[in-house]
Structures are given as structure tokens and as C-alpha cells.
Image: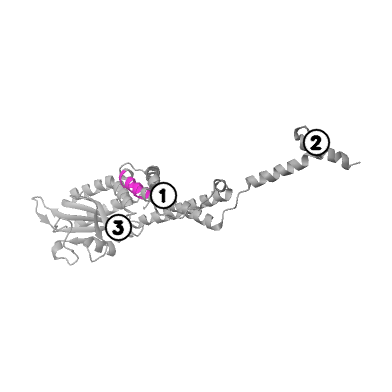
Amino acid sequence: GFCAPAASSSSASASSPATAAPGGGATAEPRAEAKTAAGEAGEVPRPTPLQLRRLWINSAVPFVGFGIVDQSVLIYAGDAIDATLGVSLGLPTLGAAACGQIFSDTSGVLFGGTIEALALKLGLPLPGFTEAQQRLGIVKRVSTFGSVCGVIVGCLIGMCNLFVVDLHAAERAKRAEELKTIMKTVMEDGRKVLGCARATLWIVDEEKLELWSSIAHGENQILRIPSDEKSSIAGWVYHHRELANIPDVTKDPRWCGKLGEWRPESMICAPVIVKDKVVAVIQLLDKMDEVGNIVPFDNNDEKMMKMLAGHTRIFMDPDDN
């Protein structure tokens, strides 16, 4: 008695599925067939390892170019801004880097299409995905991972520009700008008090093993000399940490024979010592008498020079008492 109703019900559902009872067994077979058909239609073959490797390479290569361009523009633009606006307006290095990022992002927008076109010209093998495969999660994840790896490698390569850029140039220029107003006053007063023709303040750069100055009478550019004690009298004063009073520099073995275009006769140099460390050397050249003749510096000048070095020390490091 159970089989007969089932058969009639199945027959009815086959002839008119729309009128079949909702809870009856008559709808089981059409639903199974529909589910099988949908499964066959929606099944997407998983990408092969070779396809995924090709996808990773094609995603990474253009972003290597993006990373190189982005990092290079950021470094050079940031360094240029730091050395100009950073010095003149007191813009911090982080601010200069932020401004450089504007140029970096702009270059990425302008040259993004060019970089992609160059990457295509490399003729890299394509993964050959179907439309359905391109929508798979694993394909999107591999593509994103390749892009991330590419931009990291590109940025690391772009950072090689740091070996070319003078990383301390902007710092020295900022330091010189900070000291310029104060030191210009000190050096001008010292030159007038001692009655000499020229005054120079040499700043010690221990990393580059040099003495540099932007505070020198008659010079509009940064001067640099080696800090070796045998290369100059200022270098000797730096190493020996003592004052040097030379009546005639041309007869002194420590004289290197040149100081830009200036050829001095008499010279007096004194170290500026901050916290038991020589940070600068003051150099005064060619003391003049009342009629304008060059004369040697005397003992009173040495005392005045030591006082000038003491004042300079306070200006350079107010916390050093």
C-alpha cells in the first residue's frame, strides 16, 4: 500500500512539477538533478603551481620598478628639500621627507603606465587563467603577495642611492645656519678687537675626518680641510688641543702653503673645547698695526683669543658650564 502512492505521486510530479506537494517525496529527484547540474556548471579547476608561479612573477616585476622609482625620487627630492627649505626655513628632516613623498607619489602616477608597459615588453610567460579562475581567492592572494614582494625588493634597491647621496651635507648646512648669526657676531667682534684682517671658525667633523667652515671672512661657500695634524695648522691645534701663535706662517713647518686664495703672514689659532672635546678651532690671520702693516700677535692677543674661545664654547653649547 506504501509503494503505490509513491509511484503515483512520482508520476504526477514528473508530468507537473509546479503542482507537486511541498513536503512530498515527489520533488527529491528534480532537486538532486538541479544540484548536480549547478555543481557541474560552477566547478572551477584549481590553478596549477606553474600558473601560480607565473602569476607571482608577473605581479612582482612591475612593482620592483615602482619601488625603485618611488624610493629614488623620495631620497633625492627629500634631500634637495632638506638642503634648501630645510636650511633656510628651519624645516625638520622629517618634514623634508614628507614633502619628498609628494614628488614620489606624483612620479608613481605619472610613470605608472610606462613602468607597466616596460614590464610587458620583457615577454614574461602569462599564467593563462580563465575568467572564473581569476576570481578565485588563491589567485588574488598570490597576486597581492607578488606585488608586495616586488615593491619591497624595489624599495631596497632604491635605497642604494643612499650610498651616493651625501647624508651629512644638509646636517652640516643646518648646523652652519644655526651657528651663523651667533658666530658671525663673535668672529666679527674678535676680528675687530684683535685688529686682524680675517677670522675663521673651523667646525670639527669626526665622521669625515675634516674641519669645515661657512664662517670665514672673504668666503661665501663652505670650506673643508682635512683634520690631520700634518695637513694644516688648524688640524695641529685640533689634535694637540693648545693655542698656536705663529709670527710668520711661511716659516712654520706646519703650514700647508694654501688657504683658499688667501696668503696670510701671521696667524693665531685656539681650540674650542666643549666637555673635554675639541669641537671647533678659531683662526685669526694677519694682525694689523695702526698704519695697516701686518705684525705678529702678542701675549695679550693670546689672552684675548682664549677668552674668545671660551665665549664661543658657551654659544655652541650653553649647557656646558
Q: Which mark is residue 204?
A: 3
Q: How is the image coloured?
A: one colour
Q: Secondary structure at mark 1?
A: helix
Residue type at numbered disc 2 = Ala
- Left or right: where does residue 246 sit relative to residue 66? left
- Is 214 magenta? The answer is no
Magenta residues span 74-84
Residue type at numbered disc 3 = Val
Q: Residue furthest top?
A: 19
- The residue identified by callout 2 is 12
Q: Is residue 104 visible?
A: no
Whole-percent x and y of residue 299?
Answer: 19, 58
Whole-percent x and y of residue 277?
Answer: 34, 59
Tag 2–tag 3 contact (CB < 8 Å)? no
Q: Which mark is residue 66?
A: 1
Q: Secondary structure at mark 2?
A: helix
Residue type at numbered disc 1 = Phe
Viewer-proximal residue among 50 and 256:
50
Tell me how far mark 2 sits from mark 1, CA to CA: 67 Å
Q: Nearer the viewer, mark 2 or mark 1?
A: 2
- Is 81 magenta? The answer is yes
